[in-house]
Amino acid sequence: MSKPFVSVERLTQQFPDGAGGTLTVFENATFGIEKGEFVCILGHSGCGKSTIMNILAGLAEPTSGVVKMDGFEVSGPSLDRGVVFQNYSLLPWLSALKNVIFGVKARYPDWSKEKVEDHAKEYLAMVGLDGDAIHRKPAQLSGGMRQRVSIARAFANHPKLLLLDEPFGALDALTRGTIQDELVKIWGGTEQTVFMITHDIDEAIFLADRILLMTNGPHARVAESVEITLPRPRSRTTVVDHPNYYAIRNHLVHFLGERSKELAGQDTGAEDNKPETIRLGQTGPRPAPEPVLEPEPESSGPDLRAVNQ
Amino acid sequence: MPRQTMFSGGGKMIRNFDARSAILSFVILFAGLFIWQITTYVPETELVGTVLSDEQQEVLLSKDMAAEDIEFYASQGIEFSQIDQIAGLGLSREMIEMAGGIQALGISAPDENSAPAPGSLFPSPGQIGTELWATITDPFYVAGTNDMGYGIQIGYSLLRVVIGYTLAAAVAIPLGFLIGMSPLFYRALDPYIQVLKPISPLAWMPIALFTIGDSELSSIFVIFICSLWPMLTNTAFGVANVRADWVNVARTHELGSVKTAFTVILPAAAPTIITGMRISIGIAWLVIVAAEMLVGGTGIGYVVWNEWNGLRLDRMIVAILLIGVMGMLLDAAFARLQRAVAYTE
Ligand SMILES: Nc1ncnc2c1ncn2[C@@H]1O[C@H](COP(=O)(O)OP(=O)(O)OP(=O)(O)O)[C@@H](O)[C@H]1O
Ligand SMILES: [Mg+2]
């Protein structure tokens, strides 16, 4: 088997625990990402998702283990890995446009001024920002608009790998949906590889080709890799009707609810501590044959569908 | 549109507020000037002169003293008994003056110094206004080394401040950057900064005068040393506290350290740095007045000292007012700069 585009091998991170000892956040975390894949990672707070992302970005060094991209070991940040930080991290003294230009200029230093600006505007338009909004400072933009600027900045640089840390965490449901659609559209158009952290199960299912599941920390690891066997293009309103949707969703809820705790601290037993691949429901029976009559109170999915039908 | 009404309503309220505060300012100014004028008002009749009764006047006239002379001596504050003595001499005023004045003839009269001289009483706003007007209308005259327009004197002070301050900025900002970016330097230099910073700039004056010798350079050095610390510590603090997220943005864009310093750290720390520069210019302007009082020669600080020695309090107060106005202008310039680099997160 050939190596995946990004391969994370036996990554371990320890921090001083503040009481003189060491805190092993995750241990021997191993997984791969294929080229052009959209991968989401789910896990409880504190299991080390952001830490893994910082290591992938090259902003932090792991205690042990390696990250390879295209066969080369990652050491230090690179323009090949674009990052959308959890808090947007726009430069507040620059306008939205100038923030994107900042990135484009770094990526393409020999482009002319006009070319850089046109390119930046093109990507801002792609995330639905144009007119005078792009000349405003981040403080004068709404949270959703800031997030879109941040995404535009990352996409405009054509990174080989796009890293997103809970990019929609602070957004309301409506804005969240709009930007998710835009993200999928841009990703589909550019064939970039995306690695995204989220806490939202439905968001992960809607966006991802594959979802990595982490056990609880300390000594967390990537335990399962769940393939999202839902055809694309996916529509927010119809994806929930697909027979596989609830099988996948229930599996994820079950994992995060119970098994992430049960499996904590155990090795997978597989070669290289690789996560177990889960492929659900493709041939199995539909888990909820009459979904309208069987609403699930804890999820918004069925309600939404009932309304839309 | 309700929005528009609300907005224009807000605008009116702000304009109202401006007008009210301006009116209040003027009321305070006029009240202050009025009280000042009253307390410094001295009726001239009370100032000098002896009041002679008709009887006394008769006595003097009977001794062949001219009525004109009697009036003159009385206006000089000379007592009746002494005027009587003068009358006894039988000499006219012209003759007495030719002989060297009444003092020369052994008659004690209030001498010039004990009569209130024009500047020895606290000047009234009116007197100051006159001096101020003279200064404003002709600020740049040169009538000798000790008599130059206040415009020129302020210019001397400003020149010293600008030179010392610019040198300080040229040292403090790069050094502050280094200290802010390197925890090692931060720790290593911190003790020196903490000890040197609280030393009064004027305490450096003797060292400067001894080592540099030249008084001009010494005052520039004192400005340099007092401007240095706020700029240095603020730059270091601003640079050290740039949000790690923004530095990470620079890192993920593969910016080199020089580019990161100029495109991320400098704009991020600029408000803190400019605040330091604003504090420094304020201190420099305070210190130049004191330094010029010490070393003398030229400058608005020297003017204050000089006018005090000449007991020209009215001119001194004009100089003091100019110091305040100039300080305000310097501060306003930096306030404007501060607004230009400010950002909201
Ligand atoms: N620089 C650090 N020093 C010490 N401990 C750290 C450091 N960074 C992270 N940790 C610890 O590592 C653990 C994982 O942190 P991380 O931010 O990666 O969690 P996360 O999975 O992203 O959580 P969340 O979902 O809440 O964002 C936490 O227990 C945290 O306290
Ligand atoms: Mg996190």
Image (tube, coloured by chain):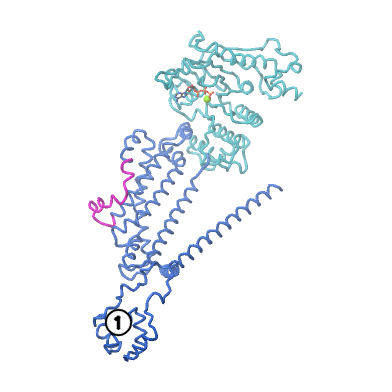
Chain colours: A cyan, B blue
B257 or B300, which lies in front? B300
Q: Is residue B64 left or right of residue A59?
A: left
Label total for image:
1
In the displayed structure, A221 sits above or below B161; it is above
Check disc 1: other Cα within 10 Å, few if <14, some if 14-19, many if 20+.
Answer: some
Kind of residue at badge 1: Gln
Q: x%, y% of residue A74?
A: 45, 23
At 71% across and 12% down in the image, what residue appears?
A: A286
Name which quarter of the figure residue B73 lies in: bottom left
Q: Say which residue label 1 marks.
A: B82
Q: Is residue B210 magenta?
A: yes
Chain letter for mark 1: B
Q: Is residue B287 magenta?
A: no
Q: x%, y% of residue A191?
A: 58, 26
Which residues, given as a range, are shown in magenta? B194-217
A90 or A126, which lies in front? A90
